Amino acid sequence: MSSATLTTAGILLITVVAVAYGGLTLLTHLARRKAGYLDNPVRRGLWTAGHAHAGVLVLFALVVLPYVDQAGVSDGTATLIRSLFVAAPILMPLGFFLSVARPQDTRPNRLIWLTVAGGACLAAGALLLGVNLL
């Protein structure tokens, strides 16, 4: 594996701590019956989705990283692909969390568009890598 891929993997592995902390936070909200979480189904649903997407997307990025080195692309393209796969698990959960940051929020605000940006990064990275692996 290239040093750039190893560095990216290291960064992604460190983010697992943040995902685990998020899971602990959600569990604490449930256990303590935190107002603004249990009584707000929109917030609860979006925060659950944010946590789930963060974990799955970090794992997905770690799985595809070795393929970046096998794709035979230029250094710039490889950096772009790695960046897209790192951006997705950051942007998408941020959109879920920040769109209903206040306990009284019952509708997502405009920051929900970060989820779309994260999805676009994921799709672009997967398409770019997939095409270059063919």
Image (cartoon, helix red, strand yellow):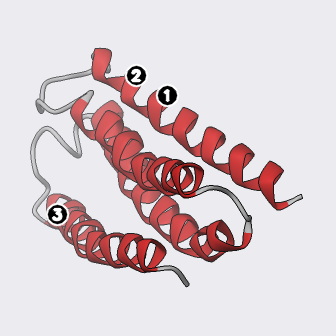
As drawn, is 16 to the left or to the right of 119? Answer: left
Task: Name the residue beneath numbered marker 2.
Answer: 113
Q: Which image quadrant is residue 44 in?
A: top left
Which residue appears at 82% of the width and 61% of the height?
133
The residue carrying pointer 1 sits among few (fewer than 14), some (14 to 19) or many (20 or more) residues within 10 Å by Cα, namely some
Q: Earlier in the sequence, mark 3 or mark 1?
A: 3
Figure quadrant of the N terminus: bottom right
Which label sits in the foreground, 3 or 2? 2
Q: Which residue is mark 1?
A: 116
Q: CA distance from mark 2 to mark 1?
A: 5 Å
Q: Nearer the viewer, mark 3 or mark 1?
A: 1
Q: Residue 117's spot in the image, x, y percent?
A: 46, 30
Q: In the displayed structure, would residue 131 be above or below residue 19?
A: above
Q: Nearer the viewer, residue 84 or 46?
A: 84
Label 3 and label 2: CA atoms lie apart by 24 Å
Question: Type of residue at label 1?
Answer: Val
> Is 71 on the left or on the right of 125, as rendered?
right
Q: Judging from the image, what secondary structure is the residue with disc 1 in?
A: helix
Residue placed at 14% from the left, 38% from the top?
36
- Any mark on residue 25, and which? 3
In the rendering, at what x and y percent does residue 85 appear?
Answer: 51, 54
Q: Which mark is residue 46?
A: none
Tell me the SS state at disc 2: helix
Image quadrant in which the C terminus is located: bottom right
Callout 3 amino acid: Thr
Which residue type does callout 2 highlight? Trp
Q: Quarter-wise, where is residue 100 in the image?
A: top left
